[in-house]
Image: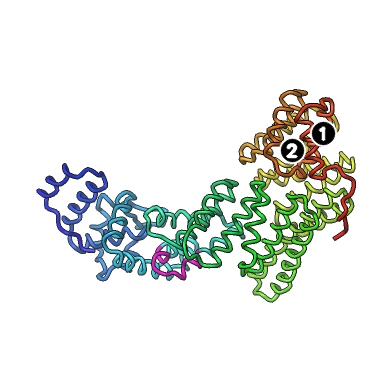
Amino acid sequence: MKLSSVSFDELMAQLPVLTEPEDKDWLALRFSLNQLPEKVSDALLAAAIPHWFDRDYLNALLDTPLSEDEFNALVKLSSIEPFPARGENTFNVHERTRKLLLKRLWENDQAYYKKLARKAGAYCQRQHHRDNTLWLIEGFYHKFLVDDRVVVKVFDKGEEWKEHDEFSSLELLTQSLSEHVESGKMTGDGIATIYHLQGLLDFESENYLGAKENCERALQQENLDVDIKATCLFNLGNIHYQLDEYVQAKEYLEQSLPILKSEFMRAWCFRMLGAAWLGLSEYAETREKTKKALSISKKMERNAKGLASSSQYKQISLLKKQQAACIISFGYVELLLENYATAQQYYESALNLSQKAQDKERQAISIIGLGNVAIALGNYAIAQQHYEIALDLSQKTQDRKNQAACYWNLGVLMLETMQLEQALSFFQQATQLFNEKSRKREELLSSIMLATVQNQVASMLEQLELFLSDSLNLTMFSFGLNLVFKVCEKYPEHPAFIQLRARLALAGVGEKKKPDSQNL
């Protein structure tokens, strides 16, 4: 893009007239560029395209490469600063100047902008041997604007990094591509992909409302690629499940299932449908959907044995995590149905699988499940051992969600055995962690348990009414709520007790057997 010249007199005349700060900055920058040799001025425009550059990188973008003296003249400009994070003799355009140059380049000459981006993307593709991930992300950043095929590749790469817990790479990619949203360059699949990536990060940090908003924005884009649409629908179903909105979760998951092409994603979708049905206390549907997920996963594992060793290891590890999650669901169903021996077998099987997959999170969940079986059978010493083992594992992996669950269960155990001081301490720790993770329902229930321990009956009943007004399903809190129920029995006419009794009956908590009880 050739810039029209600006004389000093024109600069002085126009600056007082302009009202927008950006227009003033652009006029001053054009004046500064006009004072430079043409090759240096053109090089500064090109240097704004990448996030960093050295002489080789910059020359790859230019029609006429810079000499060493010309490059040295460029990097001495006040708008250029060293970029030591990418090595010696590496630079970048100062962020404020870079944003202004990119904005005006895009507005005034998109063809030239895309030409430079295409060259930058090609250069990055040749640099994989130097630092694969960062050059890959930088290449995606440039090619995202000029090659529609790259949009789907980015979408798939984001899903791959999520599956393998490579969230630092996912965050770098999202931060890089978000520039295109902020500058208004993207529409359709491109902008949907960027919202989707941000939604994945929000989900991982348990910012479920933020994840929901970003996934909904992605689905609002027109003419979406079917794979992008399917994955966004699935993710929205998963988000609604995390928000305990099981009906909405089921609806989105059912919409995604017919158009999901990946067998792994189909297995995951069936598993999440089973979890949604479990949230609705529909145990037969839970079993059916989870069985389908497990069947697909086992078939994929058999097929994966023909892959190359590194790919095989990753694929089989993911599939074993999937299978462990399915078996945990089976165990939970049997626990709720009070088939304790069967529940224990499932949890032990899930623990074995998750250990093989080196999946610390599901190891902890399986051990917590074994503790829940023990406490249901009145084996309090064994339950405490399981909870303490799971707590130690969760602390080592900084898994705060499972830490909170361990503290909660230990609190219930201590309350059941009338060790009130220990119960108080555990519920306080659980409440703090639930607060940090924005788990509002769990935090409120911990507060109810704290009030129960402290014999603050009025406060407990008041908080219980609030909890019940916002809770669709109570099965996951059955042990604690049964203890609250015992306290409430002293106040049979209180609205909170009447509602709790009705809700526990609706959830089937405490019933000895259900008609669909069977071994899987």
What kind of residue is marked 2? Trp
Give the residue drawn at x 87%, y 59%. 519
* Element assignment for label 2: helix
Above or below 430: residue 260: below
Reading the image, the residue beneath label 2 is 408
Front residue of 85/378: it is 378
Mark 1, other Cα within 10 Å: few <14 / some 14–19 / many ≥20: some
- Tell me, yes or no, whether the highlighted magenta stretch contains residue 82: no
- The residue pinned by badge 1 equals 483
Place residue 135 in its image quadrant.
bottom left
Amino acid found under the numbered disc labelled 1:
Leu
Q: 10 Å neighbourhood of mark 2: few (<14), some, or many (≥20)?
A: many
Q: Is residue 173 visible?
A: no
User: What residue span does the magenta drawing correspond to?
Assistant: 142-154
Q: Quadrant of the N terminus?
A: bottom left
**View extreme (left): residue:** 9
Residue 400: x and y in percent read 66, 43
**Residue 59 image position (x, y, % from top left):** 30, 67
Q: Quadrant of the C terminus?
A: bottom right
